[in-house]
Image: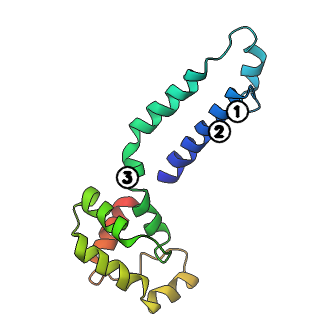
Amino acid sequence: MISDIKAFIRKIELWEQNLTDGDTRHFPVLSENISQNPLEPYDISNLQDNFNNRFKDFNEIAIVAQLVVSPFMDSDIQQFAASLTQNFSEGIAATEMEVIEFQNDLALKSLVSNTKCIWPPVSEDKYLVLCRVALKVK
């Protein structure tokens, strides 16, 4: 769902720029009617502002979602741990250490190349915080 929301926000940004430039390629019906009722630039900006306000919490956990989807990707561990602390009430020190251990676990890395999803075979006892958050984010 986070991916869908982020994609829609990017679409709104594109549409706003297109409409500001007078480009209505994504709105064929609008192009037929725009000469009768000119579009005000703030119309699409209001949509973007409202959407960003409604889903601002998704931006706050974007780094968490990214690590859940691609757990071995280089990421800012301190920023990730801070986001977990703020949004999921997990301990920052334990999270930082767990992420470092997780990302350097060669057995888990080998599973990624052999399976579509990393999380089912991951030991919940060993990676308690990450598994708990992965279930919440998924």
Instruction: Identify the amino acid type marked 2.
Output: Leu
**What colour scheme has been applied to the protein in the rendered image?**
rainbow
Q: For the residue labelled by badge 2, is the local secondary structure a helix, a strand or a loop?
A: helix
Say if 65 sits above or below 20 in the image: below
Instruction: From the viewer's side, name the closer residue of 113 and 92.
Output: 92
Q: Which residue is disc 3 drawn over?
A: 60
Q: Residue at x 23, y 66 (%)?
A: 90
Graded by Cα atoms within 10 Å as few (under 14), some (14 to 19) or many (20 or more), the crowding at tag 1 reads some
Q: CA distance from mark 3 to mark 2?
A: 22 Å
What amino acid is at disc 1?
Answer: Asn
Tell me which residue sits at (41%, 76%) in the image: 120
Q: Are marks 3 and 2 in contact (CB under 8 Å)?
A: no
Amino acid on which the number 3 mark rests in the picture: Glu
90 relative to 31 in the view: left or right? left
What residue is pinned by disc 2? 14
Residue drawn at point x = 26 percent, y = 82 percent: 125
What is the CA distance from the residue labelled 1 to the residue labelled 2?
A: 6 Å
* Mark 2 surroundings: few (<14), some (14-19) or many (≥20) residues within 10 A: few
Asked if the residue at tag 2 contacts the one at tag 1, i.e. Cβ–Cβ closer than 8 Å, the answer is yes
Question: Which residue lies under the disc numbered 1?
Answer: 18
Height in image: 77 above or below 4? below
